[in-house]
Every structure is written in C-alpha cells, then in structure tokens.
Image (cartoon, helix red, strand yellow):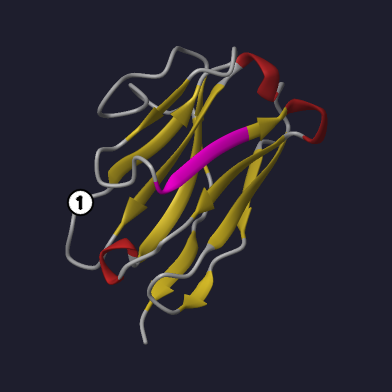
Amino acid sequence: QVQLVESGGGLVEPGGSLRLSCKTSGFTMDHYAMAWFRQAPGKERQGVSCISDSGGTYYADSVSGRFTISRDNALNTVYLQMNNLGPEDTAIYYCAAERAPCMSGRMLRVPDYWGQGTQVAVSS
C-alpha cells in the first residue's frame, strides 16, 4: 500500500522557519521525482518545489531563496526546509510523487501519488 505521510506543519510567526517531512512507503522512492505543493484557502493548488530522482531541484519564484527541498532515499523521506516565512505561505502543504522528471513551473505533470497534507499557518 502506497503512503505519503507529511509532518512538521504548525503555527509560526512571520520570519520563522519550519521543516516539513514526507515519509513514503509502498513504492521505490529512488526512481521518483518528489514535489511539494500547497493550497491556500480559496486558491488553487500550486507547485512549490520539486526534486528529481538525480537530485536536481526546482522552485516556484515565490519561494526561491527561502525554501530548500531535499531527499534521503535511504529513509524514503523528502524534506522542505522553509525559512523567512510570511503570511502568504499559509496553506496546506502536500507531498507528491511521479515517476517522471520534474517540470519547471508546475513541478510534476500528473502525480502518481499524493499525501494527505499538513497545515502551515504563519501569523503573529
């Protein structure tokens, strides 16, 4: 059974940091591009970042320089380090996987698997 389980979300003040984790099981993560998406209230889901199976990384313009994606295939886990958070980063963050290269912009073409999401709230 395929599972992607996000964790690490929460409430943080503006300027703060969070590290999201996505623990995967049921498939060989090594062969998959892994990505983070987010959906704010009343808005469409948007791609945040993607890391290819070879380690290449992609970022949305809105998070470039503040967020860092990484993966540990031995632990079947992908991470999103988020620094200098602002209220505009408030959203539910989802992890996704696709056995295909990352795409600039939309990050993944058609994800094969999705996680359930973790809430990130940035507020003072």
Instruction: Examine the residues drawn in magenta and state their main secondary structure.
Output: strand
Residue 93 place in picture, x, y as percent: 44, 55
Q: Is residue 102 above or below residue 15?
A: above
Q: Quadrant of residue 111?
A: top left
View extreme (right): residue? 74
Is 23 included in the stretch rendered in magenta?
A: no
Q: Give the extent of the magenta segment.
A: 66-70
Amino acid residing under circle 1: Glu
Residue 4 place in picture, x, y as percent: 62, 44
Residue 39 place in picture, x, y as percent: 30, 56
Secondary element under disc 1, as helix, strand or loop, is loop
Q: Nearer the viewer, residue 119 or 56?
A: 56
> Residue placed at 71% from the left, 21% from the top?
28
Q: Quadrant of residue 40?
A: bottom left
Residue that numbered label 1 is attached to: 44
Q: Is residue 63 left or right of residue 53?
A: left
Q: Is residue 81 above or below residue 2?
A: below
Is 67 included in the stretch rendered in magenta?
A: yes
> Residue placed at 37% from the left, 25% from the top?
108
View extreme (bottom): residue? 124
Q: Is residue 6 left or right of residue 13?
A: right
